[in-house]
Image: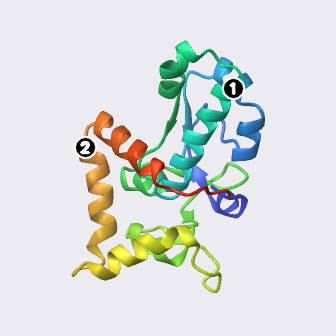
Amino acid sequence: RTGGERQVSTISAPGSAVIAAEELRQRALEFIQTYDKIVTFCTIGGRSGIFCKKLVDEILEVGYPADRADELRRKIINMLGGIAGWVHTGGGLVDGAGRPTHRLHPWCSAFMDMFPIQGLELVFDEFSPVPQDAVSLIACKSACGDATAVPQRLLQMCSMLPPEVIDDSLTQAMQNCGSYED
């Protein structure tokens, strides 16, 4: 998630470090030796999925043993559903100082209906332009008869599909994605 998003809140995972993407990229070899799992996440998993794949590719390019590539891919994973899935399953949030909070930055206005959760305060700049990455979701919602159901269906699908199906789908989707940087 971006710095602005993390200042509002991030996932509450006691005992886990929340690290910005750039720091993770710079210290990846150190972190894969230190932690059992490295989990990337964003609002719904798209930006972080692309980052996760690129990070694994970068680590392999700098000389990580190719015969351990599958092990690396199991160690560095993307949180399917992102912070939206996290709060929908009852996960807590903390602010930039680590204090519990009910505030959340949805990344952009197109993602606001992913968070119909009682007691959650959505915080974002309503005048900021919709990021290019969100245009596909907006088009999908427009084409659907019940546009408000699309986010809920996406989150439900993420929780029902077996991990190997999701991983295969994400891999195929990433092959068709352009590059993205926060």
Disc 2/disc 1 C-alpha distance (Å)? 29 Å
Q: Which corner quadrant holds the C terminus?
A: bottom right
- Could you tell me the amino acid type at mark 1? Phe
Secondary structure under tag 1 reads: helix
Relative to 170, residue 125 above or below: below
Nearer the observer, 136 or 119: 136
Nearer the observer, 122 or 168: 168
Q: Which corner quadrant holds the N terminus?
A: bottom right
- Could you tell me the amino acid type at mark 2? Leu
Question: Residue sitting at 64 percent across and 86 percent down?
Answer: 127
Q: In the image, which disc is placed on residue 161?
A: 2
**Residue 135 in sight here:** yes
Question: Residue sitting at 51 percent across and 47 percent down?
Answer: 49
Question: Residue sitting at 37 percent across and 56 percent down?
Answer: 88
What percent of the width, then of the height, locates residue 104? 56, 64
Q: Which residue is mark 1?
A: 31
- Mark 2, Cα crowd under 10 Å, few <14 / some 14-19 / many 20+, is few
What percent of the width, then of the height, locates residue 168? 35, 39
**Residue 20 in sight here:** no
Quarter location, residue 161: top left
Quarter location, residue 35: top right
What percent of the width, then of the height, locates residue 24? 71, 38
Q: In the image, which disc is placed on residue 116?
A: none
